[in-house]
Image: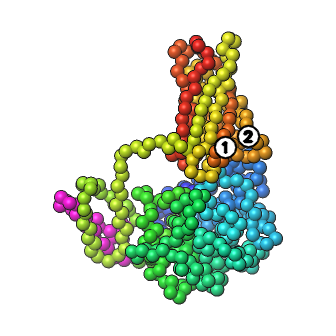
Amino acid sequence: MLLFAPNIFILQYLESTNQLTPQIRSTALTYLVTGYQRELNYKHNDGSYSAFGMSDPSGNTWLTAFVMKSFGNAKRYIFIDPVFVDQAKAWLGKRQQRNGCFASVGQLLHTDMQGGVTDEVTLSAYITAAILELKYTVKDPVVKNSLMCLRNSQAKEISTYATALLFYTFTLAGDQGMRNKLITKLNAKAIVSGGKRHWSRVNDGSVTDSLEIEMASYVLLGLMSGPQLSGFGLGYSSSIVQWLVQQQNALGGFASTQDTVVALQALAKYSTITYRPSGAVTITIKSPSGVINTFNINQSNRLLVQKSKLQQVPGDYNVKAKGKGCVYLQFNLHYNIPPPPDRSSFILSASASGNCRVPRPSLTVTVTVKYNGRRLRTNMVIIEVKPLSGFSVDETSVQLVNGNSNSNDGAVRRVDKIQGTAIIYLRGLKHGMEKVYTLKIVKDFSVENLKPALVKVYDYYKIGERAATVYTSPCPFQ
């Protein structure tokens, strides 16, 4: 879904500005069709979606809303069975409570994927915005009740993130009164520096900096998706855009995943409104030694990224622009020094035991893992167990041998065997909680001078958080 959704925003922008070429359209549609077909593997019979599909006990509320809105917006470009969109909306409607808010159901293994949608208000605002994006009106019973929930939330203190998301939601609902009230609150909390504008939040350790990108993006979406508000014209929006583009990495993405999706949606909306079909700019960059690089940007190449290597670093470079138009210039500096491993993220140990005297030994490999990183819990966790030489793994033997059986933390969701290595998928680990897993390896043939075998653990969505260890055979000779 994270690869599927951005294609929709790109197509909408290029189509609205008459820049969509047959080649780009063909490539984007291929991505959409492939993503659509793959996503159906994670669909439940009731119309919801989850990380492991039907093997999960239920669909996930946030993910189902994300899939629903993405499928609904993609219908303009590829065939999407309307039944799938209707089923998802109906399933979400059944998750609506008496107060109009939505209950969080199911677990999302990629915790950063849902961004700041972590409570009843933000989840309800996200789902409501998703339904409204599909052109349902405020008369729809689900929308009507959820808007009641969101209006009632104003009676209590809510986060800046929730305020930004509500601003976008009420913009889609056409409620100008709420829009004015919310943008006034947001404007009072805005951080303005050097012509750039963004929003921050109290960092309590449970969120990442990517939420600031989401907040700015939702405010921009709210401004771009409704009538212009007095005092909040394109100049105001432009100051948000200036801050947003400074947060982009060298490949055009942002800090995480959901912030990239939301930011691209907002920037595409802004670019559609501010697009001008004329203009040409020449950029001249002079290096400290006097070497000059020239970039010409015009209507025929405005969608292409032009790059050139810096001649020397460090150094002062002089940049001049001549012409009429808007150009985005970015300098990227990479240090080819591998960062030290984050040894504090996971604590990992492994050992093997068994009867070495039988003709064909079957050894038990015990893996102990504990998450010791900076977050309260991980995303999905992978443990890779390589067998000793001459042995093969029995992937059906993997067991969690300690922990609360009523808890999903540390639960084994799936086990694959890829090129002889056992790949164990865990639902996730809580900070500080130790888990012990066992699996069997069976001797197939004898190997002299047997070497230790490798065990690795890492967060599936944050592979920088990882650890590795080895285990040896308990048998003196093999």
List the single residue furthest toward the bottom. 230
Where residue 148 appears, x then y in whole percent?
74, 77
The amino acid type found where label 2 is placed reads: Gly
The three-letter amino acid code for the residue at tag 1 is Met
Q: Is residue 57 left or right of residue 169?
A: right
- Location of the N terminus by quadrant is bottom right
> Magenta residues, as a range?
277-302
Above-or-below relation of 150 to 250: below
* Image quarter in which the C terminus is found: top right
Q: Residue at x 76, y 42 (%)?
A: 404
Q: Earlier in the sequence, mark 1 or mark 2?
A: 2
Whether residue 248 is visible here, answered yes or no, is yes
Q: Is residue 337 above or below residue 74?
A: above
Residue 285 part of the magenta segment: yes
Q: Which residue is mark 1?
A: 433
Q: Position of residue 403 (x, y in %)?
A: 73, 40
Q: Quadrant of residue 437?
A: top right
- Which element carries disc 1, helix, strand or loop? loop
Q: Position of residue 199 (x, y in %)?
A: 52, 71
- CB under 8 Å between callouts 1 and 2? yes
Q: CA–CA distance between discs 1 and 2?
A: 9 Å
What residue lies at 48% left-to-right and 60% top-to-bottom?
254
Q: Which of the 4 quarters of the picture holds residue 92?
A: bottom right
Residue 104 picture quarter: bottom right
Foreground residue, 335 or 420? 335
Is disc 2 surrounded by few (<14), some (14 to 19) or many (20+) residues within 10 Å?
Answer: some
**Which residue matches tag 2?**
403
Q: Is residue 71 shown to the viewer in this render?
A: no
Q: At x 47% / y 59%, what residue is drawn?
A: 253
Q: Residue at x 26, y 56 (%)?
A: 314
Q: Position of residue 289 (x, y in %)?
A: 18, 58
